Amino acid sequence: MYDWFILLTNPLNLRQKLKLLAKQLTSIIDTHGITSRYGGDEFVLYLPEVTSVNTAENLIEQLVNSMNCSITFNGKKHSLSISLGAVLAPASMTYEEAFPLA
């Protein structure tokens, strides 16, 4: 798979690429949380329903497996790959408190 640098330097413009990534992330996250672009090619996923390390690992694996793929846009095939990290915070912690831990 290509890394983000290669994806970002191909003919598809950056805005289109980020929209494709956001659409794919949102379709996987569905109603379980919030997907937001943080900056550049970075996104933040807020998933309040994830309450265990095992669940977080399974979700990360699912996201990586589904995002490391090829997509077709305007008749051209493009490769995607991502890397992810996670922070598991107590339910009592607000998003604002948990985000700096990421």
Image: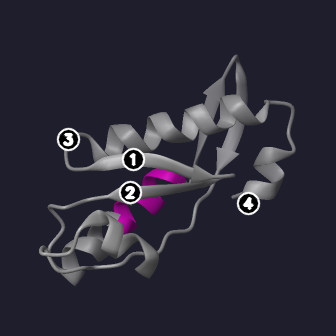
Residue count near mark 3 (Cα–Cα under 10 Å), binned few <14, some 14–19, many ≥20: few
- What separation in Å lies between label 1 and label 2 (alpha carbons)? 5 Å
Residue count near mark 4 (Cα–Cα under 10 Å), binned few <14, some 14–19, many ≥20: few
Q: What span is in magenta?
A: 60-67
Comes first in the chain, label 1 or label 2 = 1
- What separation in Å lies between label 4 and label 2 (alpha carbons)? 20 Å
Comes first in the chain, label 2 or label 3 = 3
- What separation in Å lies between label 4 and label 1 (alpha carbons)? 21 Å
Number of numbered discs on residues: 4
Query: What is the three-letter code of the residue carrying label 4?
Result: Asp
Would residue 58 be seen by someone viewing this image from the given angle? yes
In this view, the mark in front (4 or 1): 1
Prevailing SS of the magenta stretch: helix
Query: What is the three-letter code of the residue carrying label 1?
Result: Thr
- Whether residue 2 sits left or right of residue 55 in the image: it is right
Mark 3, residue position: 31
Q: Position of residue 76 (x, y in %)?
A: 74, 25
Helix, strand or loop for disc 3:
loop
Asked if residue 30 is among those painted magenta in the image, a careful observer would answer no
Asked if residue 64 is among those painted magenta in the image, a careful observer would answer yes
- What separation in Å lies between label 2 and label 3 (alpha carbons)? 12 Å
Query: What is the three-letter code of the residue carrying label 2?
Result: Leu
- What separation in Å lies between label 1 and label 3 (alpha carbons)? 10 Å
The disc label shown at residue 35, or none: 1
Q: Which residue is more in the foreground, 32 or 6?
A: 32
Q: Position of residue 31 (x, y in %)?
A: 20, 41
